[in-house]
Image: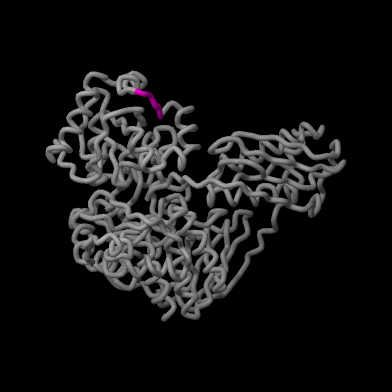
Amino acid sequence: MKNTLSTFFIILIAVCFIGCGAGADKMSYNAGTYTAAAQGMNGDVEVTVTFSNSTIKKIDIGKHGETPGISDAPIKQIPEQIIKTQSLAVDAVTGATRTSNAILKAVELAAEQAGGNVNALKNKKPAAKSGKAVKKTTDIVVVGGGGAGLSAAIEAAGAGSKVILVEKMAILGGNTLLSYAELACPNNWLQTEKGIQDSPEQFAKEMYEGGGKLAKKELVDIIAYNATDAALWLRDTIGVKYQDYLVHEGGHSVPRAVEPIELGPGMIRPLKEYAEKLGVEILLNTKAEELIKDKTGKITGVKAMQKDGTPVILETKKAVILAAGGFGANVEMRQKYNTRWETLDASVKTTNSPAIVGEGIIMAEKAGANLIGMEHIQLYPFNNPITGVFYGIEAPSWSGEGLIYVNKDGKRFVNEVGMRDARAEGILAQGGVAYAIYNQEVADRLHLEEKFKDEYAKTLADGVFFKANTLEEVAKRFDINAENLVKTMDAYNKGISTNTDEFGRTTSMVTMKTGPWFILKGVVSVHHTMGGIEINEKAQVLDVNGNIIPGLYAAGEITGGIHGNNRVGTCAISDIVVFGRIAGSNASKE
């Protein structure tokens, strides 16, 4: 799933003083209001802090370019914790570390301006928790608060079940939040408007063949025949707002994916709000650690641990639904199962959330679940070499516009809109590095410089993006053979005019003849793990003998057997919503 976001916003958090905390040492400040800024993920984060003579009274977050959805938690929680504890010894929000640290640093600078003792602020620790266990009883526990978990929780709650959702992170969303949330669905409303012929049968065929015909075909068919209903449910019931264009990813014969206007956050935010409206209890910073079984082998609950060390026992009357994601961010685990790629060690970055480390898969395996297809690990072909995350500004490759990949010799080497595994293999064959090139006409048609202003600025500063008037100039910037690059672009344009592309490319073929030119440096990253817990058509978890484990369901990337050896782009959201809803509905009937 794609995970570079393009919509930035300014949010004000004003947190009133609620006390210094038990046993806090008295501090001294020059009372007043001070403003400071520190570098975050996408630029400076501005903070205004109000001090009394002895306390931090108020923290306002001002101008910033941090990613909406991801930055929401630190922007809310870090000021709250600083004021509550009167300390800078506050843990960063996992998954939003750079934003968290920017806020902490800016408050530190403001405290210096106010004459405060910064060292004392940074060393003051909050009082320890008692560690006394919290026990709750509910109908259903959902483990994981991404797209699959929220979809499951909503379906179960809507069917009348009492639901508790546990999420180990401080924010909901998982990989869905970081993605573009594109959902492949045949015969959707945009296809109808544009006169595009499609069918569930065609979608199922392409998804199955794209996965090397190694998936469980019955599961593929369920997605193909229910994906459009899932998209309509998100749009009409949940309130997700969609773009007026279709996305055409490699592996699909026609454009068939719809995309939220606000991408991943535009899907997760309304799902969260709808779940809360139905009464779903959401426990953040709560990590599921073990499934509870009764004497008959039925799953009857979850043992969890809150971030502050408080044990949590959640007993279920009906079922547990596992939706905790795959293992793309777990280097040890992907090295253990990898059989295809030369290495997936720490030198290979990931597009995934740091939360995606396979703990749910391990927990299910210990409870007797069968694992399937664990060796099938997908690399996303073209990503920022510094972050490991794909570029928003590489969008032409999937949006029906131009863009070509070249190597250091200035030559193309692969179909740029082909299957992800083929593109990744092609880039690895070039030494693991490639360059994407498109021109101003493409950027203008897609409004890229307007939509991705911050990303262009950041990648230019980092030295992985460059723009110049001529191909020779962009070639020189990255030490590419300029003569060959000019010949390559001429051959690409000629192939369009004669419909004879040398790499068999038939889509996103747009002539690019004049500058200015854009160039990006890219590497492969671990993107999706196709293996996981085996489930049946009802999303029930199967054991090593193929039997149903009573009281246990699973949905999303935590499952295996759905995408074969290669997930076709835009099918992940189809999968997580379709099977998330199935899991929630069936678990509620237990």
Do we see residue 211 in this rendering?
Answer: no
Helix, strand or loop for the magenta stretch, by majority: strand
Q: Position of residue 147 (x, y in %)?
A: 44, 60
Place residue 571 in its image quadrant.
bottom left
Do we see residue 327 in this rendering?
Answer: yes
Whether residue 574 is situated above or below residue 262 in the rendered picture: below
Q: Is residue 562 left or right of residue 119?
A: left
Q: Position of residue 15 (x, y in %)?
A: 73, 52
Q: Residue at x 36, y 23 (%)?
A: 469
Q: Is residue 13 left or right of residue 208?
A: right
Whether residue 186 is situated above or below residue 52 in the rendered picture: below
Query: Can residue 581 be found in the magenta stretch?
Result: no
Q: Position of residue 70 (x, y in %)?
A: 53, 49
Residue nearest the viewer, comparing 465 with 450: 450
Place residue 479 in its image quadrant.
top left
* Direction right: furthest residue: 53
Residue nearest the viewer, comparing 370 with 396: 396
Q: Residue at x 42, y 51 (%)?
A: 179
Query: Can residue 466 be found in the magenta stretch?
Result: yes
Q: Residue at x 14, y 36 (%)?
A: 502
Residue nearest the viewer, comparing 173 with 163: 173
State the quadrant of the C terminus: bottom left
The stretch in magenta equals 465-469
Q: Position of residue 412 (x, y in %)?
A: 21, 31
Place residue 504 in its image quadrant.
top left
Q: Residue at x 23, y 46 (%)?
A: 419
